[in-house]
Image (tube, grey):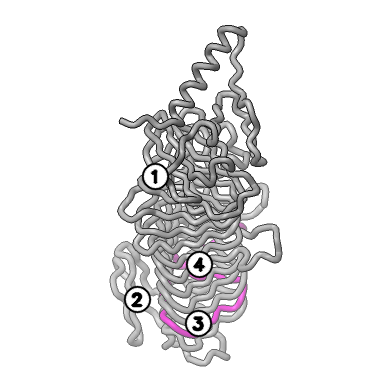
Amino acid sequence: MRKNCFMLSFLLACCINLLASSCNGKTDNTPSDTPTSTIESSNPEEQQVSIVDEKPTSNLPDGNITVVWNEETVEIDVANNLRDKTKAHFNGAHVRVLIDESYREDVQMEVKGKSSNGSLFMDGKCPLKLVLNGLALTNPDSAAINIQDGKNIHVELVKGTKNELTDGLRGKDNDSDSHKAAFFIHGHATFSGAGSLTINGKVKHGYQSDEYTVLNLGDGAIVVNSDKADAFHVKQYLKMQGGTLTAKATESCIDVSKTKSEDDELNGQFIMEGGVVTATSKGKASKTVKVEDKLSMNGGKLVATTSGEAYYDHQKEDIVSAAAVKCTTFSMAGGDVSLLAKGDGGKGLNTDGNIEVKGGTLYVVTTGSKYEFDAETDTKPHGIKSDGDITLAGGEVRVAVESKKATSIKTDWKIFTNGANVMAVGGKAFKTSGKSTHESKTGKVNVTEGGTVTFEGVSINLPKDFNREDAFVLVSK
């Protein structure tokens, strides 16, 4: 079997250090020269390998790097045109690849193999295509992959491959930039390909990018799990164009927040254009999909479920409730949205501003009870709750609440039925605006063990454990 020269260089370096230790009475593993990147090694156990001096001529095309893990070891190959621009630091199967800031051309880095104690750190100022070609990395101490490049980062999941990234419970830098997530990207991230990627966040988030992320996966799939924080945490905006994203978390499954720059486009927004997103959260007051600004549903399918219950926050001196979707404004022109809130006080769709539905199918159900902290402080499990106007102008809207204390569609502002096919079941009665273009009809229905409920020729399918006698119903068509 061919021995990689990098591995030989690494072993020779270890032997030299051991000999120096025996002669000088101390061990010094500090790299002999400093990489030209702004990120320098602070780990005395790392060994720096010079690409120019130690690696023979590469057969890789210009701009290419390959990194292969084999449990406790890692091998790297660098294209000839990058050898004098690249530094590699090794600590067992942990590798840091540093590309000189003067190099601004595209770089493709293929990563594959397996290690239960390995990681990849990359920094530079060049656009990067990161090709995951059957990679399984677990880092017990920090992120499995940490990309600090800051430019356009294109992540490709090679067709037919399975990839998995896991961070560690014993991380020492849990509050630093080096360990915000099992997979962290500093830059503009785009995902494509027909492979699969599973991300397991054991300390904080599963995935995080500090600028926008676009998912255009085609037949590809990403599964993200987080034990401690958000599963999929994105700043600026998240755009879903294709493929499958499945997220499970105690807190938010998907969290989109604003950057500090007011000039960043679509800041704090989540745009669904295609693909399927399935998200499930279970923590107290968890928001399965949390969007700081606007959620735009233009296509694809979004399924969000929360089983979290409300609780009283003594610092805020107020009740905090769970929601399947929490955003500032909500706009829907197409696609399918299915929301379920199971916990006491939990909301289906909860917005701070206006809601507008012009197309697609919106289905919202809550099955929890009213949450009471004391006789004067409570919150109710409303289906749709808005602190702005609700305009139902097109598409199909189905909402049901099991609690008689809640309201299926709740706002202190106005509800307009302007052409959507609407059916709302359960809870307290409510009225639509007299300025609506389409009239509404109300009545009473009995719901036993869910199933299909029909009123005035409009139907809704309810979960089998949904029960409400003498339930209020409103329809508009």
Query: Which is more N-terminal, label 1 or label 2?
Result: 1
Q: Between marks 4 and 2, how big is the CA–CA gap?
A: 18 Å
Q: Nearer the viewer, residue 228 or 349?
A: 228
Q: Which mark is residue 289?
A: none
* 277 with respect to 430 (left or right): left
Is the C-beta separation of discs 2 and 3 under 8 Å?
no
- Residue to which mark 2 is pinned: 460
Residue 316 position in % (x across, y down): 67, 51
Q: Amino acid at mark 3?
A: Leu
Instruction: Judge whether 30 appears above or below 61 on screen.
Output: above
Q: Which residues are magenta?
A: 377-405
Q: Is residue 193 magenta?
A: no
Q: Amino acid at mark 2?
A: Ile
* 303 with respect to 372 (left or right): left
Between marks 2 and 3 in the image, the one whose residue lies nearer the viewer: 3
Q: Report the quarter where the N terminus lies.
A: top left
Q: Between marks 3 and 4, how big is the CA–CA gap?
A: 14 Å
Q: Which mark is residue 164?
A: 1
Query: Which is more N-terminal, label 2 or label 4?
Result: 4
Residue 361 position in % (x across, y down): 41, 76
Q: Nearer the viewer, residue 204 or 129?
A: 129
* Label 3: element kind: strand
Q: Nearer the viewer, residue 123 or 416?
A: 123
Query: Which is more N-terminal, label 4 or label 1?
Result: 1
Query: Which is more N-terminal, label 4 or label 3?
Result: 4
Q: Which mark is residue 392?
A: 3
Residue 158 position in % (x across, y down): 36, 54
Q: Nearer the viewer, residue 264 or 161?
A: 161
* Label 1: element kind: strand
Q: Amino acid at mark 1?
A: Glu
Q: Between marks 1 and 4, how big is the CA–CA gap?
A: 32 Å
Q: Between marks 3 and 1, how big is the CA–CA gap?
A: 42 Å
